[in-house]
Each structure stands twice: as C-alpha cells, then as structure tokens.
Image: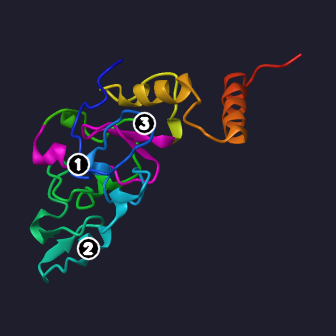
C-alpha cells in the first residue's frame, strides 16, 4: 500500500472521521464548502472566516476573507497572494486536468503550499496540486503523488464501505456500464 499522507495533513480536527479510506484530511479541504468529515466538522465555524473587513486600499480575496494590498492585485501570475488565487485571474479560471503551476508541486513555500483548489469539481492531491473531480475515479493517475490513484484503488477494490445494498448494486452497475461503454452487447 502506498503512503496516502503525502503533502500537508490537517491534524487539528481530532474528531474528523473520513470514513473507511485512509486518506488524511488536507488543510485545503477545511472550509472549502464541501463536507469531508462524516460529522461535518471541517465546515463548522467557517462563517467566522468571512467576517474580515478590508480597509479602503485593500482587496478582499474571494474565499477565506484575506485582505491584501491593492498593489498585490494582478501583480504577477507567479505571485499569488490570496489563498484561493483570486488576486490573479488566470489562476482563478477553471483549471485543466492538471494543476495551475507545476513548479509548485511539493515545494513548501507560501506561494505554493498555501494554494487552495476552491473549484467545486476539484480533487486535492494533498500537495498544492489538484485535478478536476469529473475525471475521478480514473484508470490512470493525474496527481503527481498518486493520491487520486490510491483513492480510486480503495473505492474500487471493495464495496464494503457502502452499507446500503441497493446503492452498492447501483454503483457496481454504473462502473460495469462505464467499462463496457462503446461495446455492442450480443
């Protein structure tokens, strides 16, 4: 089994239960408007982040509520100052299959490690890189650290984590149909 804790694991939510798979909670998954802990702990108290009031000469980042000086706004795509990258529009657009900046993968600097993937259909790789969730699960890996591969392996190796038999059967049928898509059944 591969190490699924590659990247930054958020350990301050002691009662966060992610279910049956061993993927650690990446700090970028906290307050991202998606429930990752079964008890919803990762999305509690997030409204407190949004109460920041910026002064007149500051820009308020879209998510997280940080304030940055206006001179940092759109100053360089290599200088992302907001955690959500909303200060640099080319980073804030819908991403392609891969991350925004390959130079940032596994580099622990503010510019890279503090990057978030706030897009609704993104999967955090745990090291600043993220991919579109629409390609999950996939037969090949897209995260450079293979975190998506490990999740796919766990999800598709056993259906024991799905308690409801009807739901388990529906997922099995959907996976079988997607594998035989394009083939003519006789």
Give SS at disc 2. Answer: helix
Q: Seen in the image, is 24 located left or right of residue 87?
A: right
Residue drawn at the location 19% of the way across and 34% of the way down: 103
At horizontal 37% and vertical 35% (from top left) the residue drawn is 98
What are the residue bounds of the magenta stretch?
108-133
The image quarter in which residue 180 lies: top right
SS at mark 1? loop
Say which residue appears at 13% left-offset and 82% top-offset: 55
* Image disc number at residue 115: 1
Numbered mark located on residue 48 in the image: 2
State which mark lies toward you, 3 or 1. 1
Quadrant of the drawing holding the N terminus? top left
Among the 4 quarters of the image, the one containing residue 68: bottom left
Along the polypeptide, which appears first: circle 3 or circle 2?
Answer: 2
Q: CA distance from mark 3 to mark 2?
A: 32 Å
Query: Is 60 left, or right, of 130 in this rendering?
Result: left
Label 3 CA crowd tier, 10 Å (few <14, some 14–19, many 20+): some
Mark 2 vs mark 1: in front = 2
Badge 2: how crowded within 10 Å, few (<14), some, or many (20+)? few
Task: Let me know if residue 52 is in the magenta part.
Answer: no
């Amino acid at each position: 089994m591969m190490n699924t804790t590659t990247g930054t694991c958020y350990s301050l939510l002691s009662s966060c239960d992610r279910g049956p798979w061993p993927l650690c909670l990446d700090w970028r998954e906290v307050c991202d408007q998606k429930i990752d802990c079964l008890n919803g702990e990762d999305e509690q108290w997030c409204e407190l982040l949004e109460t920041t009031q910026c002064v007149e000469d500051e820009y308020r980042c879209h998510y997280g509520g940080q304030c940055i000086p206006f001179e940092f706004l759109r100053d360089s795509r290599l200088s992302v100052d907001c955690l959500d990258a909303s200060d640099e529009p080319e980073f804030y657009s819908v991403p392609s299959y891969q991350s925004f900046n390959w130079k940032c993968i596994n580099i622990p600097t503010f510019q890279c490690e503090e990057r978030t993937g706030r897009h609704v259909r993104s999967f955090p790789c745990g090291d600043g890189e993220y991919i579109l969730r629409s390609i999950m699960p996939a037969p090949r890996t897209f995260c450079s650290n293979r975190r998506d591969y490990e999740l796919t392996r766990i999800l598709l190796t056993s259906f024991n984590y799905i308690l409801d038999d009807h739901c388990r059967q529906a997922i099995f049928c959907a996976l079988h149909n997607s594998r035989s898509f394009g083939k003519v059944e006789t």
